[in-house]
Image (cartoon, rainbow, N blue to C red):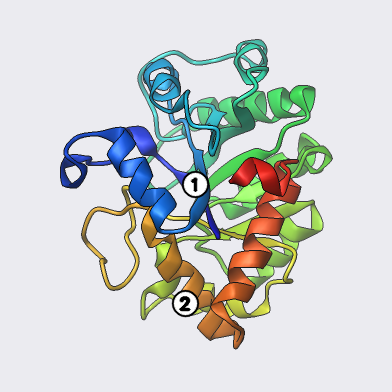
Amino acid sequence: MLIDSHCHLDKIDLKPYQDNFATFMHEVSAQQISHLLCIAIDLEAYPAMLEKVANYPNISVSVGVHPNVHDGHEPSAEELICLGHAKKVIAIGETGLDYFRSEGDLTWQHERFRQHIRAAKALKKPLIIHTREAKEATLRILKEEHADEVGGVIHCFTEDWDFAQQVIDINFYVSFSGIVTFANAKNIQEVATKIPADRYLIETDSPYLAPVPFRGKPNYPMYVRYVAECIANLRGVSFANIAQESSQNFNRLFSLSSETSL
């Protein structure tokens, strides 16, 4: 069984599934995907996202505001704490820093990031971290806010082995997306080869970043299999080994039992 540790189920194109979420979820289960973590990116869409997945015990959610979101409500730590108490919420985020899509004075982005970390610490729930062209500042803020107390995951990892080692040292995991299957992703593939067996997750980030052989097309949680197969080949182990390790790591990080992921 596999776990997709990061997907955006409210953004997925359901046309191939008769525009029916239940039909889509039936296919997810048929493809041996035992659990999904549906990630929030803003608070405006959050209620509808939560309603969509409410009746599925094998779907958990996060709550947070993505660093690239410029419009909409800016949450305080107290508001995130209030939302984060819901049973279905197992993580805070997606939060972090993005210097690729945002320019100018990014003090607001730093403050948003800090509010999320403080909420996660109050809730004792892990963080889902987005970082793009901002690894030094991301690491600095994580350390300054003592994010190691709750840990979390650097999702859709795109950095090098040196950065991976540094985030592991502060109690974070590394999550590999479909990017690891790209021929030019040599740095990420090196990290996938070297990462300790107890420090990685796998994800799709669907509907974005579909793996080879679907690159450039809409992504789906079922394609997490291709991420697992790629990592198995890189590490010289079986597919079953990667499925087991990544699922155990997910359950440990988010304090879930293996039964919860069925």
135 vs 222, nearest the viewer: 222
Q: Position of residue 224 (x, y in %)?
A: 44, 61
Which numbered tag is attached to residue 169?
none
Amino acid identity at mark 2:
Cys
Using the rendered view, name the quadrant where residue 95 is placed. top right
191 vs 11, nearest the viewer: 11
Asked which secondary structure carries label 2, the reply is helix
Q: Residue furthest bottom?
A: 236
Q: Residue at x 63, y 53 (%)?
A: 136
Using the rendered view, name the quadrant where residue 61 is placed. top right
User: Which is nearer the N-term, disc 2 or disc 1?
Assistant: 1
Q: Residue at x 48, y 31 (%)?
A: 56
Residue 205 visible in the current orientation = no
Which numbered tag is attached to residue 6?
1
Q: Residue at x 50, y 63 (%)?
A: 158
In the figure, 255 relative to 77: above or below?
A: below
In the figure, 203 relative to 64: above or below?
A: below
Q: Position of residue 98 (x, y in %)?
A: 47, 43
Residue 101 visible in the current orientation = yes
Question: As drawn, is 29 to the left or to the right of 60?
Answer: left
Residue for badge 2: 230
Q: Are marks 2 and 1 in contact (CB under 8 Å)?
A: no
Gap in angstroms between the C-alphas marked 2 and 1 = 18 Å
Q: Position of residue 11 (x, y in %)?
A: 30, 36
Asked which secondary structure carries label 1, the reply is strand
Q: Position of residue 254 (x, y in %)?
A: 70, 42
Amino acid identity at mark 1:
His
Q: Residue at x 24, y 34 (%)?
A: 20
120 vs 48, nearest the viewer: 48
15 vs 233, nearest the viewer: 15
Q: Which quadrant is home to the N terminus?
A: bottom right
